[in-house]
Amino acid sequence: MNLHKIIDKGSSLESTVLIGLDELVMEIHQSQVHRALESYLQSLRVMVGQAVADYGALYSPLLRSIHTSRTKASAVHDHFFHHARNYAEKTPGVRFEQLRKLCMLHFSEGFIIRFKKMDKDLLPSGHLTDQVVKFRTQQALEGLPESVHLDLGYEEDMLGNLQSVYLICPSGPRSNMWVSELNDEAPATTTVVSLFEASNTIIEEPAGAIIATKAKQDKRNETQSGNGDSGA
């Protein structure tokens, strides 16, 4: 079984993230991911807010009334990666990558993050292409180093304003291993929903995150909704 390794910034030692690249995807520990990405979380949250705000500011009310939810999600996606490119250019250890329609941020700590609008089940919108399946099943992508794959997702309220931003660890085409909410009030602090356990216990993490566990969701046999961009 292949294992990914990430650098735990809180320690001088390497921490092994348990994730198999075979049929079974093992648990990736969210506390290790939080520590490794801690210095980036606020910027990720801000860029999502900027992308959603861009849509409201740069498109006229007439255009917004014509746009479908799919068109809006595609526009927000493009504006996010406009900001992400600029962020990568000035941030050591971060690279912007694009494989066909799949745009991503690669972090030297061993992570690749893509940006997607989420549905009510906190699963990404868009089509399940072969590339998306590889990404969500933690398989290596052509031309990129083996990394832990994460989704940076968002939800909107009834008025189309930004409601929530999530860092999500996928475990399959239609399943998540865990979900972390990046809070606006303290963007570097995350509320974590673990999908591996059925209890509702609350655990304090050293970095200040709150872990609330709930039952794992798995919808592998469903097709993804089409209310987002058509690309990966």
Image (spheres, helix red, strand yellow):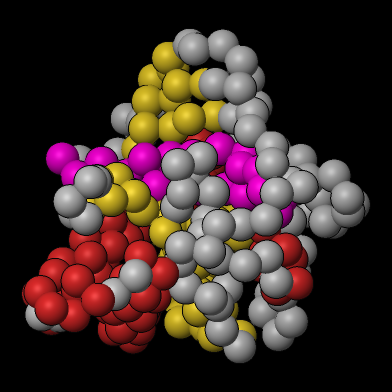
Q: Is residue 173 above or below residue 189?
A: below
Residue displayed at 61% across by 88% down: 100
Residue 206: quadrant of the picture: top left
Q: In the image, residue 125 lies at what x, y percent?
A: 51, 59
Could one spot residue 39 in this view of the protein? no
Per the picture, the main secondary structure of the magenta-coloured stretch is strand
The range drawn in magenta is 165-185
Question: Could you say which is closer to the camera, residue 187 or residue 101?
Answer: 101
Q: Nearer the viewer, residue 222 or 136?
A: 222
**Residue shown at 53%/64% (left/top)?**
226
- Residue 199, picture quadrant: top right
- Vertical placement of 139 versus 155: above or below? below
Work out whether 171 lies above or below 79.
above
- Residue 96 location, x and y as percent? 46, 82
- Nearer the observer, 226 or 170: 226
Whole-percent x and y of residue 108?
Answer: 52, 69
Magenta-drawn stretch contains 129? no
Name the residue rendered at 61%, 22% in the picture. Answer: 215
Q: Is residue 108 left or right of residue 20?
A: left
Q: Is residue 43 left or right of residue 175?
A: left
Is residue 179 magenta-colored? Answer: yes
- Work out whether residue 81 or residue 207 is closer to the camera in this orientation and state it: 81
Q: Indicate the position of residue 29 as horizontal and vertical percent values.
A: 60, 38
Q: Is residue 162 left or right of residue 16?
A: left
Count of numbered labels shown in the rendering: 0
